[in-house]
């Protein structure tokens, strides 16, 4: 949990620094993977999404591709693999607005849908100007 909090703080700080300039550009998004030094985590993807839509990856065993999420502002998609223990393989995504960030962060998902990244919830938060993240960590406890 400390790793996830540290990661979110690091990415939120990166977003905050960019927000001081009102927007992050696509090149800064692409450089983010190389610029972050994380313990027990690695950035596996850092790419700008400028098409105003995003098609989530298909779930394992899905019979049909997922529907596109549309009417999105441009954003920086950062995918990570977190390994706080030797047997961990936690996937996480952080979406950072490239413009119009409201200065706030929202962690989404993992209630009844624990165990998968909640792309629709990321899109909803992003449309409202939030930087947002989700992980595939299952919900623990009741």
Image (cartoon, rainbow, N blue to C red):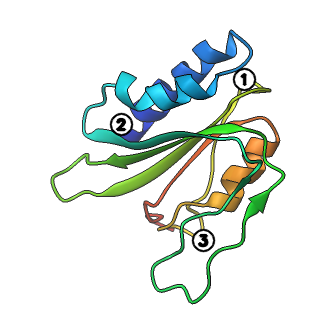
Q: Secondary structure at mark 3?
A: loop
- Mark 1 or mark 2: whose residue is earlier in sequence: 2
- Nearer the observer: mark 3 or 1; the answer is 1
The number of callouts visible is 3
Q: Residue at position x 20%, y 50% from top?
A: 85
Q: What's the mark number on residue 112?
A: 3
Mark 3 / mark 1, whichever is N-terminal: 1
Residue 52: x, y in percent?
A: 77, 48
Q: Specify whether 9 is left or right of 102.
A: left
Residue wearing tag 2: 2
- Identify the residue shown where x is 51% and y is 68%: 142
Query: Residue sitting at 74 percent across and 46 percent down?
Result: 125
Would you place residue 130 above or below residue 125 in this image?
A: above
Q: Nearer the viewer, residue 58 or 92?
A: 58
Give the vertical position of 116 relative to 15 (above or below): below
Residue bearing the label numbered 1: 103
Please identify, in this view, whether the residue under mark 1 or under mark 2 is nearer the observer: 1
Cα separation between marks 1 and 2: 23 Å
């Amino acid at each position: 949990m400390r790793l996830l909090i540290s990661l979110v703080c690091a990415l939120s700080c990166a977003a905050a620094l960019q927000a001081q300039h009102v927007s992050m550009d696509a090149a800064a998004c692409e450089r983010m993977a190389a610029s972050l030094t994380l313990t027990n985590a690695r950035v596996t993807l850092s790419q700008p999404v400028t098409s105003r839509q995003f098609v989530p990856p298909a779930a394992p065993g899905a019979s049909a591709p997922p529907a596109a999420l549309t009417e999105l502002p441009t954003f920086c998609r950062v995918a990570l693999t977190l390994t706080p223990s030797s047997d961990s393989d936690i996937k996480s995504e952080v979406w950072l607005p490239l413009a119009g960030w409201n200065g706030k962060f929202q962690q989404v998902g993992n209630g009844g849908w624990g165990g998968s990244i909640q792309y629709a919830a990321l899109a909803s938060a992003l449309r409202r100007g939030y930087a947002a993240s989700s992980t595939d960590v299952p919900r623990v406890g009741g």
